Image: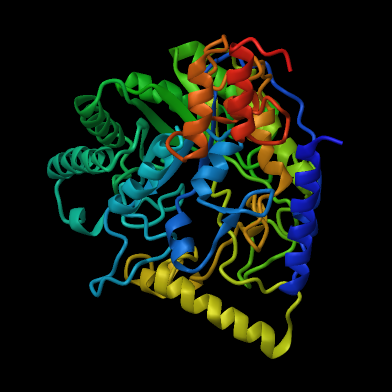
């Protein structure tokens, strides 16, 4: 038996004993195995992204995340270690009432986006900045003006939007984020930045795009719609942007299989924008439930008897089904060709701030009330009561917790599900054992890089970690660095 195998068995035993001592057991969902069929991506830089806009509010509420070995780590580190290469973060202009109580949904202002972007960059991930150009949720039904722009004329609004875009990007970049893409509006079917006249909406897009280009011409500009199942309308939107001279790079849509039709139709509408107008195309939002159970006391988007049936729901509500959905959506985008840019999973870590599963009576009520207090204080629910200041008819009326805790890649305790590995294993990977910098050859720099990784002075992406693990212990360790040195010195062991 290899020494490393002995160590792993001892470590596993210690984890089990620790769990028993603390009166807990590892959740069954976290134990389930998942298989992933690789995709031959036509775009070598295919985005395997995730929106984690709620992460700071969750952490402030006491939530922690653990990798598959039970080790508590930065969520961004766990995602990067599992193959996520891009982070998406929403930005609201001023998600606070006059007393500075947050509206919830992560209270995602510019400063919050900057913090998340800096953490993403630490682990080699680019950032997609998703400007809602509103103070709270912007979607097909709501494109409300920010409070400070409400009384502005269209020309003054465009000036304010341009200045806000430039200043926000400067703040985010100065924090250390690697901005790769900017989304100028969120699900802009009916408007953007409070502008709903279809003669004027393109003017908003043009102003926003110009501000991004002036800030950095290498940043991709994305325009985001939803309802791709409305084939003719979605294709018309691509025509409409071209007819109105809107300068952008990426035609993006949301795709939730319980609402948005078939995967074949998704490929069809994306291919139209790619082939007709030479645009990159991507899915800016998708998600799928790994269970139909709720864990925070707030109703979920997908639950038993609600959005859980239909001809386009091709996968089980299990970690394997979740991984299969993500792979299938990636494959649908990849089928467009080289213009198929990627897929972002929406809020894949928005778990409960307090697990209500299995509770009833007074225990359930107490836990739910504790959750509500955290949602209100830290904005870790989808909306707080303060949101009535801005959106009294929806958010203020139905404020509460996470509607997607059962669509995360982490269980209620923060443990990574096996489905998270889809972002890495969907790649067909080849590497030279020991080649930690993926240069294609074995050098002394590889041993140095492994040592720096172990000292937390650099980060290795998942492929590099596999290459560095030359002794197949399951992760890079100091023995791997030594092994590389011995090979280069000519030792044959």
Q: Is residue 262 above or below residue 51?
A: above
**Residue 177: which quarter of the image?**
top left
The number of discs equals: 0
Front residue of 293/114: it is 114
Towards the viewer: 241 or 466: 466
> Which color scheme is applied?
rainbow
Say above or below: 258 vs 248. Answer: below
Residue at the far bottom in the pictured view: 362
Residue 189 visible in the shown view? no
Asked if one can make out residue 450 in the rendered structure from this viewpoint, the answer is yes
* Residue found at x 72% / y 35%: 473
Who's the residue at 23% across and 43% down the image?
171
Query: Residue 198, image x and y in percent?
Result: 33, 36
- Horizontal and vertical percent for residue 45? 51, 19
Left or right of 148 on screen, residue 3 = right
Q: Identify the residue at horizontal 61%, vertical 86% (top origin).
A: 366
Q: Position of residue 84 (x, y in %)?
A: 55, 35
Instruction: Tell me the quarter of the image containing the C terminus.
Output: top right
Residue 48: % across, % down: 56, 31
In front: 115, or 326?
A: 115
Q: Is residue 185 left or right of residue 418?
A: left
Image quadrant containing the N terminus:
top right
């Amino acid at each position: 038996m290899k020494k490393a195998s002995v160590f792993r068995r001892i470590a596993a035993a210690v984890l089990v004993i620790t769990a028993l001592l603390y009166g807990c057991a590892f959740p069954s969902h976290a134990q389930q195995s998942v298989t992933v069929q690789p995709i031959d991506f036509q775009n070598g830089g295919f985005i395997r992204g995730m929106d984690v806009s709620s992460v700071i509010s969750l952490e402030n509420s006491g939530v922690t995340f653990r990798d598959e070995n039970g080790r508590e780590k930065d969520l961004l580190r766990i995602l990067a270690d599992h193959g996520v290469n891009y982070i998406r973060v929403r930005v609201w202009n001023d998600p606070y009432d006059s007393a500075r109580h947050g509206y919830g949904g992560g209270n995602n202002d510019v400063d919050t986006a900057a913090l998340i972007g800096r953490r993403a960059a630490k682990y080699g991930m680019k950032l997609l900045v998703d400007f809602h150009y509103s103070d709270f949720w912007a979607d097909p039904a709501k494109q409300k003006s920010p409070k400070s722009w409400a009384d502005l004329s269209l020309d003054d609004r465009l000036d304010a939007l341009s200045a806000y875009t430039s200043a926000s990007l400067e703040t985010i970049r100065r924090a250390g984020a690697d901005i790769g893409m900017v989304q100028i509006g969120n699900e802009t079917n009916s408007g953007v930045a409070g502008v709903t006249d279809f003669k004027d909406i393109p003017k908003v897009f043009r102003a926003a795009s110009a501000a991004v280009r002036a800030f950095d011409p290498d940043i991709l500009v994305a325009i985001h719609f939803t309802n791709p199942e409305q084939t003719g309308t979605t294709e018309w939107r691509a025509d409409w942007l071209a007819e109105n001279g809107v300068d952008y790079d990426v035609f993006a849509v949301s795709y939730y299989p319980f609402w948005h039709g078939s995967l074949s139709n998704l490929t069809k509408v994306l291919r139209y924008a790619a082939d007709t107008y030479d645009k990159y195309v991507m899915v800016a939002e998708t998600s799928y439930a790994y269970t139909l159970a709720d864990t925070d006391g707030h109703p979920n988007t997908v639950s038993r008897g609600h959005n859980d049936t239909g001809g386009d729901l091709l996968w089980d509500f299990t970690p394997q089904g979740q991984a299969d959905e993500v792979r299938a959506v990636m494959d649908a985008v990849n089928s467009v060709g080289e213009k198929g840019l990627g897929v972002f999973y929406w809020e894949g870590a928005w778990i409960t701030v307090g697990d209500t599963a299995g509770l009833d009576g007074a225990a359930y009520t107490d836990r739910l009330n504790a959750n509500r207090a955290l949602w209100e204080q830290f904005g870790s629910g989808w909306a707080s009561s303060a949101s009535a200041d801005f959106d009294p008819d929806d958010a203020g009326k139905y404020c509460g917790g996470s509607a997607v805790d059962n669509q995360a890649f982490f269980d209620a305790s923060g443990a990574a599900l096996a489905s998270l590995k889809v972002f890495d294993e969907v790649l067909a990977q080849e590497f030279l054992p020991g080649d930690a910098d993926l240069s294609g050859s074995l050098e002394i720099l590889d041993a140095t890089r492994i040592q720096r990784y172990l000292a937390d002075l650099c980060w290795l992406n998942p492929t590099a970690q596999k290459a560095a693990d030359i002794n197949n212990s399951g992760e890079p360790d100091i023995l791997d660095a030594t092994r590389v040195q011995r090979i280069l010195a000519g030792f044959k062991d």
